């Protein structure tokens, strides 16, 4: 089987994807600990617990210690957390508008870059029977991206890809 050559658009898509992945990792590594600390310092309870604490009565509700559970908090507490988070973003050098999160922006860029990388690399699997819609299954998509990144990185001599995906 003849080894395919890399198109310029695939090389660019590879570069864009690897950069987006690194940007996301940097944002997560930098901001997640700060946001976790902020959440603990703010002492936000599930919304029913807030009322109980204010009235000095027992509640089965709990202190929120995971940002994924903020949907359980009152709207006012969530708004306070978002405002304090935004202050952290600005202080840490992320120039984002209110209600925008640098981590989510970076994740979005990574997903967009991944779509382009997949589209640009599909010619590498011509004749294998693999179709673009086969990659709608997350496990298959991740495996395809991982293997294709490894292939492309070897073809262009980029050893940094070993840490991506």
Image (spheres, helix red, strand yellow):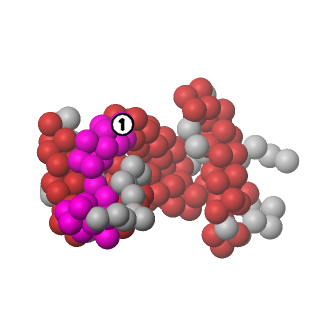
- Looking at the rendered structure, the number of numbered marks drawn on it comes to 1
Which quarter of the picture shows residue 120? bottom right
The residue that mark 1 highlights is 33
Identify the secondary structure beneath mark 1.
helix
Seen from the viewer's position, the closer of residues 32 and 77 is 77
Q: With 96 as the anchor, is 109 left or right in this view?
A: right
Q: 18 or 105: nearer the eye?
A: 105
Q: Which residue occupies the extreme front position in the image?
A: 57
- Magenta range is 31-56
Which residue is rendered at x = 20% and y = 43% of the image? 89
Q: Residue at x 69, y 59 (%)?
A: 139
> What crowding class fits label 1: few (fewer than 14 Cα within 10 Å), some (14-19), or many (20 or more)?
few
Dominant SS of magenta comes to helix
Is residue 31 visible in this depiction of the protein?
no
Left or right: 7, with 155 as reference point: left
> At 41% from the left edge and 51% from the top edge, which residue is drawn?
66
Question: Residue 78: x percent and y percent?
Answer: 24, 62
């Amino acid at each position: 089987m003849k080894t395919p050559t890399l198109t310029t658009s695939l090389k660019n898509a590879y570069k864009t994807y690897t950069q987006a992945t690194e940007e996301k990792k940097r944002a997560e590594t930098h901001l997640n600990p700060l946001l976790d600390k902020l959440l603990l310092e703010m002492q936000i309870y599930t919304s029913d617990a807030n009322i109980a604490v204010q009235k000095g009565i027992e509640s089965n509700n709990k202190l929120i210690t995971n940002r994924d559970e903020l949907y359980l908090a009152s709207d006012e507490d969530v708004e306070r957390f978002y405002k304090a988070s935004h202050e952290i973003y600005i202080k840490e050098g992320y120039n984002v508008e209110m209600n925008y999160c640098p981590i989510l922006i970076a994740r979005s860029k990574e997903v967009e870059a991944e779509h382009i990388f997949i589209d640009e690399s599909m010619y590498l699997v011509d004749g294998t029977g693999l179709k673009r819609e086969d990659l709608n299954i997350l496990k298959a998509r991740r495996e395809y991206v991982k293997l294709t990144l490894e292939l492309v990185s070897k073809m262009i001599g980029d050893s940094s890809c070993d840490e991506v995906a």
